[in-house]
């Protein structure tokens, strides 16, 4: 069970999301990013959140789902806020 992948990814205002069959495109004020999902992972865009679905019986799929969720979240942050060093 991936605890990271079970958390939905919030979408802030000003960010446009396009989810295709096996890819996602994120565009905002800072630019545009694209990502292709692994075979065992998929995402759905509903309202202002993105949820990740995967095969929970496969350890590889669980790990890839957590990584995919983190990458999508980082893409959204990068396109809306940008890089910040603190």
Image: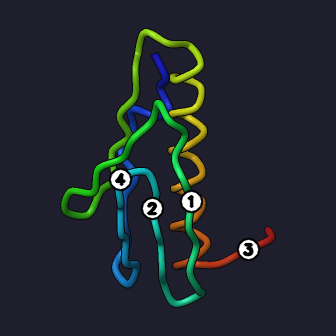
Number of the front mark, 1 or 4: 4
- Say which residue label 2 marks: 24
- Say which residue label 4 marks: 21
Q: Position of residue 46 (x, y in %)?
A: 20, 57
Q: Secondary structure at mark 3?
A: loop
Residue shown at the point (59%, 86%) measured from the top left = 31
Residue shown at the point (60%, 39%) measured from the top left = 67
Residue 81 appears in which quarter of the rendering? bottom right
- Say which residue label 3 marks: 84
How far is disc 3 from disc 1 in space, using C-alphas? 22 Å
Tell me, for residue 69, which label it has, or none. Answer: none
Tell which circle, 1 or 2, labels the residue nearer the N-terminal end: 2
Specify whether 85 is left or right of 11.
Answer: right
Tell which circle, 3 or 1, labels the residue nearer the N-terminal end: 1
Q: Secondary structure at mark 4?
A: loop
How far is disc 1 from disc 4 in space, using C-alphas? 12 Å
- In the picture as drawn, the residue positioned furthest to the top comes out as 57
The crowd level at tag 4 (other Cα within 10 Å; few <14, some 14-19, many 20+) is few
How far is disc 1 from disc 2 in space, using C-alphas? 5 Å
Tell me, for residue 35, which label it has, or none. Answer: 1
Q: Position of residue 19 (x, y in %)?
A: 35, 61
Tell which circle, 4 or 3, labels the residue nearer the N-terminal end: 4
- Circles 1 and 2: CB atoms closer than 8 Å: yes
Tell which circle, 3 or 2, labels the residue nearer the N-terminal end: 2
Number of the front mark, 2 or 4: 4
- Circles 3 and 2: CB atoms closer than 8 Å: no
The crowd level at tag 1 (other Cα within 10 Å; few <14, some 14-19, many 20+) is some
């Amino acid at each position: 069970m991936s605890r990271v992948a079970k958390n939905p990814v919030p979408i802030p205002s000003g960010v446009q999301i396009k989810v295709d069959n096996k890819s996602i495109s994120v565009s905002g004020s800072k630019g545009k990013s694209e990502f292709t999902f692994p075979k065992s992972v998929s995402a759905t865009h509903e309202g202002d959140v993105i949820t990740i679905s995967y095969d929970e019986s496969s350890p590889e799929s669980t790990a890839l789902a957590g990584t995919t969720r983190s990458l999508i979240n980082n893409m959204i942050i990068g396109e809306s806020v940008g890089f910040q060093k603190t």
